Image: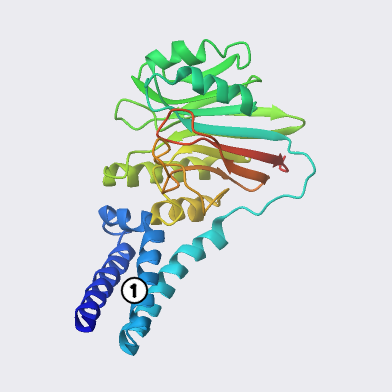
Amino acid sequence: MRILFSRAVDVGLSLGSGATVAGLLAPWWPALELINHFRPFLILGAGLLLALALGLHAGRLAATAAALLAANLGLMIAPALRYTASAHSAAAPTLKVATLNTWIAKGQASRIRQFIAQADADVLLLQEIGRGDRAAILDELASSYPHALFDRNSRSGPALLSKQPWTISGSIPTGQGRPLAVWARFERDGHTFEVASVHTANPFEWHEQAEHIDRLIAFARSRRVPLILGGDFNLTPFSWKLIKLAERADLRWGQSLSASWPGHRMIPIVLLDHILVSRGIATVRVETGPFVGSDHLPIIADLVLEGP
């Protein structure tokens, strides 16, 4: 029996090591990004293998498991330390932003409207909002959010709702039937800033997703005022693409160790929804919202405007 367990640990270590190395190749082979999304599970697996190896008094296997555990912990913790926005100590935030992938007309419009009313965000970012949802959600919210921005020509896409008017607005095209993002510039309490509602390609559309990140980087680097990017990025904080976006566009995200998908299951397992901020905007609090009928949980951020 001991030999059987030792062989099982050996096989597990080989698979875990192979997956870890493969994940490092994601910048060159985008399909391997799927491994990085599940970094916490590699850590859990390495921890279990280490416990088994110690129980078997197998020094070589224990050392290998410890190294595998340390490598994956480092790969998870390093981005969190570098790219998670530090919390601002302000007593009261000056801007509240919420984002939610609505999951296209699944009959949860009333629950979504109830959440939006309770969240009371200044700017609301929605994704996968279809034409039917627009009538069921946007029109009903017109009194609270009289300013709505979305692509009228696409079947579904990102939308931006605001309590106050914007000065200019636009979209980031993809050439694939819907915009990658819609964005607007606001003036508030002497501050100028921009907010974008983002929805990148799903994790299995590897090349499209990589192209979308490059488009977001180009957009963010072209802005001359503080920027907030919020939405369904279909990327975890452990993915090279989100790290690339944060690094090259000088952005910081609000959460690392949380989960927003699948929100309709018993326990969400990965964080795919984010609110990223540039210099000039600080976070007071970023939290995951309640289940509202979608397969994504909402993300709510209390922010402080510091820039011009």
Q: Is residue 152 visible?
A: no
5 vs 165: above or below: below
Residue under the image location 52 percent in, 33 percent down:
99
126 vs 300: above or below: above
Image quadrant in which the N terminus is located: bottom left
Q: Quadrant of residue 84?
A: bottom right
Give the residue type that dot 1 points to. Leu
Q: Nearer the viewer, residue 306 or 41?
A: 41
**Coordinates of residue 71 in the picture (x, y in percent):** 41, 73
Q: Quadrant of residue 295?
A: top left
178 vs 54: above or below: above
Image quadrant in which the C terminus is located: top right
**Coordinates of residue 201 in the picture (x, y in percent):** 33, 38
**In this view, which residue lies farthest toward the front?**
1
Q: Is residue 50 visible?
A: yes
Q: Nearer the viewer, residue 197 or 293?
A: 293
Left or right relative to 170: residue 50: left
Residue under the image location 65 percent in, 26 percent down:
120
Q: How is this picture coloured? A: rainbow
**Coordinates of residue 213 in the picture (x, y in percent):** 40, 45
**Coordinates of residue 220 in the picture (x, y in percent):** 51, 42
Residue under the image location 46 percent in, 46 percent down:
217
Dot 1 falls on a residue whose secondary structure is helix
Q: How many marks?
A: 1
Q: Nearer the viewer, residue 141 or 51?
A: 51
Q: Nearer the viewer, residue 155 or 57?
A: 57
228 vs 140: above or below: below
Q: Which residue is mark 1?
A: 49
Assess disc 1: are there few (<14), some (14-19) or many (≥20) residues with their C-alpha within 10 Å of its C-alpha: many
**In this view, which residue lies farthest toward the right?**
91
Residue under the image location 24 percent in, 77 percent down:
5
